[in-house]
Image: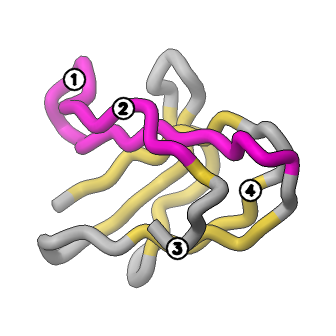
Amino acid sequence: ISSDLVKIDAIKISEDRKHLIIRLHDFAGASQQIKIELGAAVKAWISCNLMEELEGEYQTGDICFPLSPYEIKTIAVII
């Protein structure tokens, strides 16, 4: 993860077993651009809520997104 001001709270398989779920949050109150690098090729990723309901459109390429101060963010990844 590209920032020391972000903590990863969970890495797990989604309830539907289709995604790798990564949950993180900003603990320092800083707006920032986050990049997550995994040790495996990423086919696609998408934001989701805490209930793992997908939000928006699938993205390809690097896992990069803005994170607001104190925001909790959940990402669903297809590997």
Most foreground residue, 34 or 14: 34
Residue 26 left/right relative to 35:
right
Q: Quadrant of residue 31?
A: bottom right
Dominant secondary structure of the residues highlighted in magenta in the image = strand
In this figure, which residue is indicated by the disc labeled 2? 10
> Whole-Å distance between the Cαs marked 4 and 3?
12 Å
> Whole-Å distance between the Cαs marked 3 and 2?
17 Å
Of mark 2 and mark 4, the one earlier in the sequence is 2
> Whole-Å distance between the Cαs marked 4 and 1?
26 Å
Residue 41 left/right relative to 72:
left
Tell us which disc is closer to us: 4 or 1: 4
Of mark 4 and mark 1, the one earlier in the sequence is 1
Of mark 1 and mark 2, the one earlier in the sequence is 2
User: Which residue type does callout 3 highlight?
Assistant: Ser
Please report contact status of discs 3 and 2: CB closer than 8 Å, yes or no.
no
> Whole-Å distance between the Cαs marked 1 and 3?
28 Å
Look at the picture and state if 22 lies above or below 44.
above
Residue 79 left/right relative to 47:
left
Residue 27: percent from the left, percent from the top?
71, 40
Of mark 3 and mark 2, the one earlier in the sequence is 3
Seen at 38% across and 45% down, the residue is 76
Magenta region: 7-29
In this figure, which residue is indicated by the disc labeled 3? 2
Q: Quadrant of residue 66?
A: bottom right
Residue 65 lies in the magenta stretch: no
